[in-house]
Amino acid sequence: MLPQDTFIGGSIEVAGRTRPANTVGGDLYDILRLNDNRVMVVLGDVSGKGSPAALLMALLLAMLRTLAPDDLPPPKLVERLNGLVYEQAPGTRFITLFLAIIDLRTGTFSYVNAGQTPPLLRRQSGAVEKLATGGIALGMFDASTYEQAESHLAPGDLLVAYRDGITEAENQAGRPFDEDGLERAVHTHVSSPAPDLARTLFTVVEQYAGNVKLADDLTVLVVKRTDA
């Protein structure tokens, strides 16, 4: 159900990767081309694990792909999704979501972060920004509203959206990989194409954990603007 191929539009590369902790999981990502000039990228997580979370994940993807062609601004789109999740999901379930619409010509993007772990925007200079603007998770209240923020991918910049299974992975000493570990891995492998970086981040986390079983799903979405 999730896109397997790398998206390339102009100088923008997008690639995602996920691995459930159990047979199936509730993490999701999507890459939706809206028109010749814009692409929507999404990463999220359904609360809980196993089949119930996976079913709600599938429902959200279906709703998102149905609404995407309506060309709603990110806050309105997320508000619509929130209302639908509130109506359809059990009261104990909610969904965290990061959604961005990127202009393929300029690298400018608008985003909403609905309770998701803030993605990292790594500048070519090495500076790192965290994208936290938005609101609460989907499905908690029926009339939640969301705030939009804007940013820009310059040539050489990199956006890494990820689930906390990445940063909470523990080694044999019980120490989590943490955001510092993720940032070090991104800095080390920043020159890699988007799909290679996504695979490498998984490898780095798995090597850090060693023989310790990962307790949560691993999911990452990489957006890179090349120098082309």
Image (cartoon, rainbow, N blue to C red):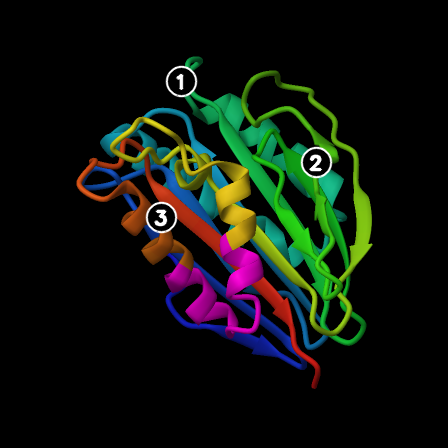
Please state the horizontal and vertical placement of residue 50, each as a whole percent of the image.
24, 32
Q: CA distance from mark 2 to mark 1?
A: 26 Å
Q: Which mark is residue 90?
A: 1
Camera-nearest residue between 185 and 109:
185
Which range is magenta? Answer: 185-200
Q: Which residue of the protein is positioned furthest toward the front in this rendering?
A: 173
Tell me the amino acid under the disc marked 2: Ala
Up/down of 26 relative to 9, above or below:
above
Q: Inspect this view and state whether residue 66 appears.
A: no
- Whether 46 is drawn above or below 157: the answer is above
Q: Any mark on residue 132, and which?
A: 2
Between 211 and 115, the residue placed more toward the observer is: 211
Sequence-earlier tag: 2 or 1: 1
* x 67%, y 81%: residue: 10
Q: Main secondary structure of the magenta part?
A: helix
Q: In the rendered structure, does residue 190 fall within the stretch colored magenta?
A: yes
| Farthest-out residue, bottom | 228
Question: Which residue has dot 3 on it?
Answer: 205
Please name which of the two marks, 2 or 3, marks the residue nearer to the observer: 3
The amino acid type, in three-letter code, at marker 1 is: Pro
| Of callouts 1 and 3, the N-terminal one | 1
